[in-house]
Amino acid sequence: QVQLQESGSGLVKPSETLSLTCSVSGDSISSFYWSWIRQPPGKGLEWIASFFYGGSSNYNPSLKSRVSLSADTSKNRLSLHLSSVTAADTAKYYCARLLRFGELTYMDVWGSGTTVTVSS
Amino acid sequence: DIQLTQSPSSLSASVGDRVTITCQANQDIRNSLNWYQQKPGKAPKLLIYDASTLETGVPSRFSGSGSGTDFSFTITSVQSADIATYYCQQYDNLSITFGHGTRLEIK
C-alpha cells in the first residue's frame, strides 16, 4: 500500500525559497505520476504541478515561473521548491499519486500534508 | 484554462436526506471529472473518478453523474460521518483545476 509523507520548512521568510519533500513508501516513484497541491488556511484546493520521473511536468500557469520539481529515486522521494514566496504562499501542502489510464486521471493516494507559513 | 463552477458553496442537511452538488465546466471535459471529500484537518479523499465510477471501498450512497460540461454528485442518505467539504476536480492534458468546494453540515 502506497503511503506518502510530506516534510520541509515550516516557516519561510518572504522572498526566500520554500522547500518540501514527499517521501513515498510502498512503490517506486518512477512508476507513477505525482502531484503537488496546496490549501491556504480556510480556503480551497489549488493544484501546483504534476510530474513523471524521467518524463514531462505540468504546472499551474500562475505558479510555473516559481516552481521547481525534482525526484530522488535512491531515496524514493519527490521535492518541490517554490521561490520568491510571499504571505499568499502560506498553506498546507500535499503530495498525491496521480493515476493515469488512458483518459482516466485521478489522485488516489494523498499524504497528510505539511503546513508552511511565510512570515518574517 | 478550464474553470469549474461548483454549487452550492454550503448546504445543511438532516441525517437521511438526499443532497446533490453540481459542478459546471466552462468547456467540454468529456468525463474527466473527479470528486473528493475532505474532512476537517484531513487530506482529501477520492470518492468518484471518471465522473461516475465509485472508488473502491467508498459507500454506495455516494454517486456521480454527468459528462461534457455539467456534472453532479449525490449522497442518497446523508450520514453524520459525511460532514466534510466536497470538491470537484477536472484534468485536461494534465492541467488540473478544482472547484471551490461545498461544505456539508448536518442540521
Image (cartoon, coloured by chain):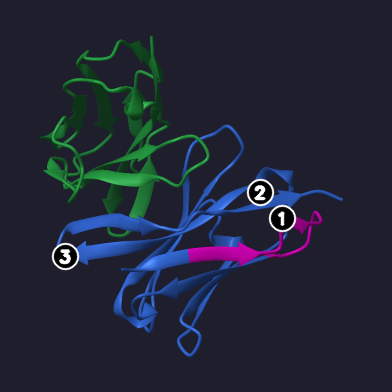
Chain colours: A blue, B green
Q: Residue at x 13, y 40 (%)?
A: B52
Q: Chain of mark 2?
A: A
| Left or right: B84, with B66 as reference point | right
Name the secondary structure under disc 2: helix
In the rendered structure, are the residues bearing label 1 and label 2 in contact, judged by CB atoms less than 8 Å apart? yes
Q: Chain of mark 1?
A: A
Name the secondary structure under disc 1: loop
Q: Which mark is residue A89?
A: 2
- Circle 1 is placed at which residue position? A85
Q: Amino acid at mark 2?
A: Asp
Closer to the camera, A72 or A16? A72
Q: Amino acid at mark 3?
A: Phe
Q: Chain of mark 3?
A: A
Please report the bounds of the magenta region as a residue range. A5-18
The Cα atoms of the two marked residues, 1 and 2, are separated by 6 Å
The Cα atoms of the two marked residues, 1 and 3, are separated by 35 Å
Name the secondary structure under disc 3: strand
Q: Position of residue A4 (x, y in %)?
A: 45, 65
- Circle 3 is placed at which residue position? A101
Q: Amino acid at mark 1?
A: Val
In the image, residue A9 lies in the stretch drawn in magenta: yes
> Do the residues indicated by labels 2 and 3 lie within the same chain of the protein?
yes
Is any part of residue B98 visible from this angle? yes
In the image, residue B12 lies in the stretch drawn in magenta: no
